[in-house]
Image (spheres, helix red, strand yellow):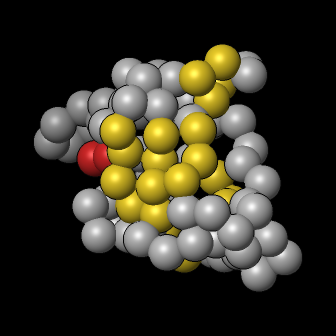
Amino acid sequence: MSVIGNQPSTGQHVVLDSIVTNGNSAYTLQKGGSSVTEYNQNQLIVSVNGTIQAPGSSFTVSGSTITFASALTNGTHTIDFI
């Protein structure tokens, strides 16, 4: 099939390990049980309770730690994917 315009780009998208919320605002980013540090907040798509979060205001990333603007309580907040 032909494409008009720029060829769509493909990436090596990765789904990070699930995070269980526990009332804190900071959590460790992991893939396969190991901490990951190669991502910055602008490279991540984060969904909480079905809503995509805005990097920089809803969450920040430093090293392997993702910190949300407010605490995420278990049973109320669910991190759908990162």
Q: Residue at x 57, y 36 (%)?
A: 29
Above or below residue 45? Residue 12 is above
Q: Quadrant of residue 1?
A: top left
Q: Quadrant of residue 31?
A: top right
Foreground of the two, 60 or 55 = 60
Residue farthest to the front? 24
Above or below residue 22? Residue 77 is below
Above or below residue 40? Residue 81 is below
Residue farthest to the bottom? 76
Q: Residue 61: horizontal and vertical position, in percent? A: 37, 45
Query: Disc count in the image?
Result: 0
Residue farthest to the right? 75
Q: Is residue 61 something one can see in this rendering?
A: yes
Q: Residue at x 73, y 20 (%)?
A: 32
Q: Is residue 11 something one can see in this rendering?
A: no
Above or below residue 63? Residue 51 is below
Q: Residue at x 80, y 70 (%)?
A: 74
Q: Residue 37: horizontal and vertical position, in percent? A: 42, 24
Foreground of the two, 62 or 43 = 62
Q: Residue 52: horizontal and vertical position, in percent? A: 48, 69
Foreground of the two, 80 or 3 = 80
Q: Residue 2: horizontal and vertical position, in percent? A: 32, 34
Judge left or right: residue 1 versus residue 34. Answer: left
